[in-house]
Amino acid sequence: MSQELYSHARLYDLMFPGVDAAIEFYRGEAGRQGGRVLELGCGTGQKLIPIASDGLACVGLDLSSDMLTEARRKADERGVAVEWTQGDMRELDLDRTFDFVFIAANSLLHLHHADDLLSCLRAVRRHLAPGARLVLDVFNPSVRVLAGADGLRRTRDSLSFVDPDRGRVSVDVAETYDAPAQVTRATWYLSTDDEPDFVVAPLEMRSIFPQELPLLLSLGGLRLVARYGDWSGRPFGGDSQTQVCICEAA
């Protein structure tokens, strides 16, 4: 799993400030389930801190110590109690169960091999209390977009942001697609006028296609209960950009 981009946790939050609809979706799902909440790949706590602020007992696990440091800082600033744990979602072993587990913002796609995905899903299954749910979201792969990953460096205007210390930061990405592995291999470049390429970081993400996902869940001991195409609960379809999946123990 490529982690270098996530060592810049403060910049990550500026580049990806969080989608309000996604935050409220997970907040609502957690509230309906109640009980204990676990987020895998919690990052800087964009979704988990609001859930914890509703009074639920929350645990956040992430591989990146830098992301967790920023998560702790943000939670402390808001006066919210969260148990932050550094760990690998493939080797999840917290010796307790949870009523609501979620894996948001494509975090599952850092696991590139089927064995790694199944290790994670089976570990989640062991951590589900009776009646608990796993909710996750991954993007819906576009064959057209994947075919266009030609390795050329392009500016992503939608990702540019203002850093209070540096000013305007532009973001360029160069991507290729490894079709046999179903992995997009990218290099991200962050630049200012005064500091070109002050961050150069690899990022690799797997694609999970719609017909593949229920099979992986089943092999992991889970069952797909519902799949939405966005955060409003719109039914999943061919034009959906996201797969929002509600799962239970099989």
Image: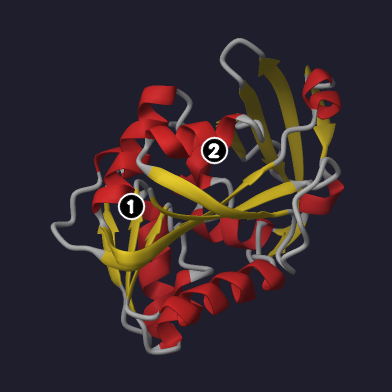
Residue 222, x across and y down, in percent: 40, 46
Amino acid at dot 2: Pro
SS assignment at label 2:
helix
Residue ID for mark 1: 65
Q: Is residue 175 visible?
A: yes
Disc 2: which residue: 214
Residue visible at 34% across and 46% down? Answer: 63
- The correct choice, above or below, for 175 with respect to 195 in the image is above
Give the residue type at disc 1.
Ser
Q: Image quadrant for the N terminus?
A: top left
User: In the image as oriented, which residue stretches furthest toward the left?
Assistant: 95
Of the residues under marks 2 and 1, which one precedes in the sequence?
1
Q: Residues within 10 Å of mark 1 (few under 14, many from 20)?
A: some
Residue 101 seen: no
Q: Front-most of 15 and 185?
A: 185
Asked if residue 187 lies left or right of residue 47, the reply is right
Q: Residue furthest top?
A: 180
The image's colour scheme reads secondary structure
Q: Position of residue 242 (x, y in %)?
A: 71, 49
Q: Is the residue under label 1 in contact with that under label 2 (CB below 8 Å)?
A: no
Residue 55 shows which numbered tag? Answer: none
The image position of residue 9, as x and y in percent, is 49, 56
Quarter of image, res 208? top right
Taking depth in this image into account, of 248 and 118 the one nearest to the observer is: 248
For image coordinates 86% across by 25% down, the residue present is 144
The residue carrying pointer 2 sits among few (fewer than 14), some (14 to 19) or many (20 or more) residues within 10 Å by Cα, namely: some
Q: Is residue 23 left or right of residue 1?
A: right
Residue at mark 2 to residue at mark 1: CA–CA distance = 32 Å
Element type at marker 1?
A: helix
Above or below, 245 against 142 in this view is below
